Image (cartoon, coloured by chain):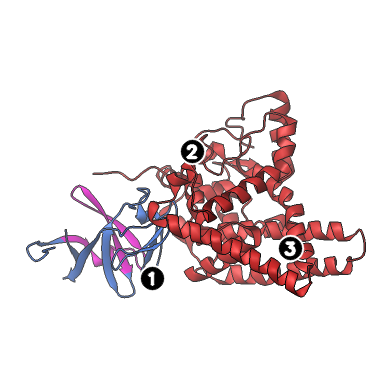
Chain colours: A red, B blue
Amino acid sequence: MANPIVTPLTQALDEGKLSREELKEFMRRSDGPALRRLVLWVGLLAFTTTLIALAWNSWLIWPAMLLQGTVLVHHFSLQHECVHYTAFRTRWLNDLVGQICGIIIMLPHRFFRYEHCDHHTYTQLHDEDPEMISMPTTIGEYLWYLSAVPYWRSKFTEVFRHATGRLSETEKKFIPSVEHKAVFMDARRMLAIYAAIFLGMALTGWWGLIWYWFIPMFLGEPVMRFVRMTEHVGRPTVPQMSENTRTNLVSAPWRFLCWNMNYHAEHHYVASVPFHALPRLHEKLKDHIHVERDGYLGAHRDILRQLFRREPAAVADRT
Amino acid sequence: MNTAKRAWTDLIAVDALERNWVTRVPLGRRLLAVYDTPTGIFASLAFCNHGGADLCDGYFDGHVIECPLHQGAFDVRDGRPVCAPATSPMKVFETRVENGMVQVRV
């Protein structure tokens, strides 16, 4: 009899870390948790937007925009949840919300979905994981990545490449040929939306979105780079999910912003589990994964320790 | 495709199916996924035609089975791909229930 491919989930089931009944319970979906969180999310955005308005003629507009940007860039986390169809039980809601998030942060939803599939298949494997953030070799490289300049350069290049009907060799590996045209159209649509927004601002003479959306997003992206580095950077570049991914225990506000994606190893074990069940899955798997108890700062201390000591990624150093 | 000449094959007792879920059932050299849905019982090959993962470990809701690896999804009634990265139909089998036994034509 043919065998299925081995995945982190099949391993967890085979090794008894998780039972089938537990898996079914963890995977259960509903619309309620995400809709409730979205109400709070919109409220938070309204609050940070108000702060910018109140600080309009003061230097305080810069910290206000940083705060707004920190929330804006975390639309990535919501989009990521939608990419997995785990934010909402209603499938079209995941598509709709994911598309909106993609427009906010300039990440076409369909493309992200295909790219992210290979990230889950080849997590932390050099030249195979398309989302891999390489371990920096110098403090300069570390800071350069955190500046988000290379990220934006890559994103702009990517969207313009797709809009002009081209894919990189890596992208051709994970986007099936039947979807090439759709990916190109998505990029063109996204650029058209931005063009329409800028045209609208030019015609009305109201350039507020620059201050409420675009500058905050660029200010906030280093925060997202800081968060994204904690997921895999500095972990061993091996296929074992128990080693190559880091779960970070962070405070409630950060968990809210990242839609519980700090439970990253649990997510990679069972990507079908919705965000609201990840804390419970953590309790089940925490002895089988790498957990950074000091959160994002602890993860960066680990990265910097390896960087300065030029140590290889720690192996099996579970806390 | 001429299915008339193919015999029905006993697969699994209806009572042994996981209610409103997907059940993994070996049949000879094949592994099948049998789905208990609101509109009846359906069956397909168990492995996802995208990445080869076992669909029986995936999330099942109504008529949609989702691959546990990439969340590509199929409609179990006709095998139609519902969302990326699934792009081609999965292989489904005609099913019926006779005397409390799920039967398939394979």
- Chain of residue at mark 3: A
Extreme front residue here? A203
Identified at 68% across, 60% down, the residue is A256
Identified at 73% across, 26% down, the residue is A308
Q: Is residue B61 left or right of residue A298?
A: left
Q: Residues within 10 Å of mark 2 (few under 14, many from 20)?
A: some
Q: Which residues are magenta?
A: B10-36
Instruction: State whether residue A50 is above or below residue A230.
Output: below
- Image mark for residue B62: 1
Q: Which residue is mark 2?
A: A128
Identified at 63% across, 38% down, the residue is A233
Q: Position of residue B31 (x, y in %)?
A: 26, 51
Instruction: State whether residue A97 is above or below residue A120.
Output: below
Kind of residue at badge 2 = Glu
Identified at 65% across, 62% down, the residue is A104
Extreme right residue here? A58
Q: Position of residue A280 (x, y in %)?
A: 57, 56
Determine which quarter of the picture holds residue A216.
bottom right
Determine which quarter of the picture holds residue A24.
bottom left
Q: Position of residue B103 (x, y in %)?
A: 18, 64
Marks 3/1: CA distance?
39 Å
Q: Main secondary structure of the magenta part?
A: strand
Q: Are marks 2 and 3 in contact (CB under 8 Å)?
A: no
User: Does the magenta-highlighted stretch encompass residue B15?
Assistant: yes
- Chain of residue at mark 1: B
Q: Nearer the viewer, mark 2 or mark 3?
A: 3
Mark 2 residue element: loop
Marks 2/3: CA distance?
34 Å
Kind of residue at badge 1 = Gly
